[in-house]
Amino acid sequence: MNIKPIRNDQDLASAFRQLEGVFQAPADTPESDEREILVTLIEAYENAHYAIAPPDPIEAIKFRMEQQGLTPHDLEAYIGSSGHVNEVLNRKRPLSLKMVKRLHDGLRIPYESMLDG
């Protein structure tokens, strides 16, 4: 097993090539240990250099609306009056913590999607 730190994209490509050779290794073998180590190194490098930011809160709400076939009227139970719903969806009113909690509890939108930095 010849494993090195991943410091740049060239090292990353090399680690992926090395991973291909041990990807189907049976459990409890030196090759499966190598696979686990490579996956850990690759994930750490990608998380540090290619982290995926959580979605924009309004886009997360719109996505859930589309998934569940909801209209702005359906959001009134979570956000408030139709005016408030329209202001939130048009980014003229920020989400309050109360709205976030209601949207999470009622529509199962993850907190991480609605609380931006």
Image (cartoon, helix red, strand yellow):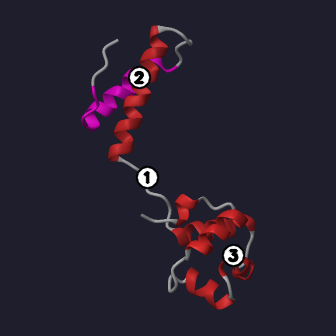
**Quadrant into which the C terminus falls:** bottom left
Between 65 and 110, the residue placed more toward the observer is 110
The residue lying at 73 percent from left, 83 percent from top is: 73
Give the dominant element type of the magenta stretch: helix, strand or loop: helix
Residue type at the position of mark 1: Ile
Residue 85 lies within the magenta run? no
**What kind of element bears circle 1?**
loop
The residue lying at 43 percent from left, 57 percent from top is: 53
> Is 96 drawn above or below residue 34 in the view shown?
below
Calculate the distance from the C-alpha at mark 2 to the C-alpha at mark 1.
22 Å
Residue type at the position of mark 3: Tyr
Which residue is identified by label 1? 52
Label 2 close to label 1 by CB (< 8 Å): no
Calculate the distance from the C-alpha at mark 1 to the C-alpha at mark 3.
27 Å
Calculate the distance from the C-alpha at mark 2 to the C-alpha at mark 3.
45 Å
Range shown magenta: 5-23
**What kind of element bears circle 2?**
helix
- Label 1 or label 3, whichever lies nearer to me, is 3
**Quadrant into which the N terminus falls:** top left
- Image coordinates for residue 15, horizontal then vertical, percent: 35, 27
Q: Report crowding for label 3: few under 14, some 14 to 19, many 20 or more residues within 10 A (C-alpha).
A: some
**What kind of element bears circle 3?**
helix
Mark 1 or mark 3: name the one nearer the start of the chain.
1
Tell me where residue 66 sits by quadrant.
Answer: bottom right
Which residue is identified by label 3? 78
Name the side, left or right, on which 68 lies relative to 6.
right
Q: Report crowding for label 1: few under 14, some 14 to 19, many 20 or more residues within 10 A (C-alpha).
A: few
Which residue is identified by label 2? 37
Q: As drawn, which residue projects farthest toward the bottom?
A: 83
Tell me where residue 63 sits by quadrant.
Answer: bottom right
- Label 2 or label 3, whichever lies nearer to me, is 3
